[in-house]
Image: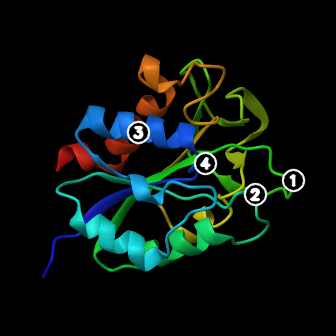
Amino acid sequence: MSKKRRVIFVTDGDLYAQKAIEKVASDIGGRCISQSAGNPTPLAGYEIVSLIHQTPHDPVFVMFDDSGFPGEGYGELAMQSVAEDENIELLGAIAVASKTHFSEWTRVDVSIDRFGELTHYGVDKGGFPDMEAGRIDGDTVSILDKLNLPIVIGVGDIGKMSGLDDPSVGSPITLKAVKILLERSGFNDI
C-alpha cells in the first residue's frame, strides 16, 4: 500500500502564480508541480496525478486554471480528477480571486488581504477585502465547494497585488496563506 501524497490546490496558473508558488514551495521544503501551470491548465488530471506521485516529498502544490472559461473548464475538470485519486490527501486550497465575468465563487474559511491581514470577508483580485463574508469570486473556484476540503483560504492575485506578493520580496501573502493552511490542516503535526 502506497503512502498518500499530501496536496495543496492553487486556483491560478499564470506565470506570476507559478513563480510565487515555486518560491513558496521551495521556502517551506515542499514541491510544486510546475508543469501544472498554464492558462488554461495544460495537463489532464491523470497526468497531474502521475507527477504528484513522482515528487520526493510533501506538501505538493498543484496549480489549476480555467482561463475564464464559464462553468467547469479544463482546470476544474483536472482538479476533480486529482481529488478523486485514493492515494492523495487534500490538505486544502488557496482560492485566488479574479475579475470573472461569470460570477463563479466559493466559500472560504478565511482570507488574507494584500497587507497580510486575516479577514472573514473575501478579497478581490487586488487583495482588498470584499463586501461579502466567507466567499471569494474567481474563475477556477466553483468546484472547491464540492471537494470537501479541510480548509480554503482566499487571496488576491498570487504573485501580484501591486508588487506586494512578488516573488522578489518572498511572496509574503502566498507564504502566509500556505503557513496557515498547513497549520490548520494538521500537516505540521505529522
Give the distance between the C-alpha atoms of the residues marked 2 and 1, in whole angstroms.
8 Å
The earlier-in-sequence mark between 2 and 4 is: 2
> Residue 179: percent from the left, percent from the top?
36, 35
- The disc at residue 108 is 4
Look at the picture and state if 127 lies above or below 72. Answer: above
Residue depicted at x 60% and y 19% = 163
Q: Dot 1 surroundings within 10 Å: few (below 14), some, or many (20 or more)? A: few
Of the numbered discs 1 and 4, the one sitting upstream in the chain is 1
Closer to the observer: label 1 or label 4? Answer: 1
Query: Looking at the rendered structure, which numbered label has been put on residue 68?
Result: 2
- The residue that disc 1 covers is 101
Tag 3's secondary structure?
helix
> Quick check: 146 left or right of 130?
left
Q: Amino acid at mark 1?
A: His
Residue at mark 2 to residue at mark 3: CA–CA distance: 24 Å
Say whether marks 2 and 1 touch (CB < 8 Å): yes
Say what secondary structure mark 1 lies in: loop
Q: 74 and 113: which one is in front?
A: 74
Q: Which residue is mark 3?
A: 178
Sequence-first disc among 2 and 1: 2
Q: Amino acid at mark 2?
A: Gly
Q: Quadrant of the image for the N terminus?
A: bottom left
Q: Position of residue 68 (x, y in %)?
A: 75, 57
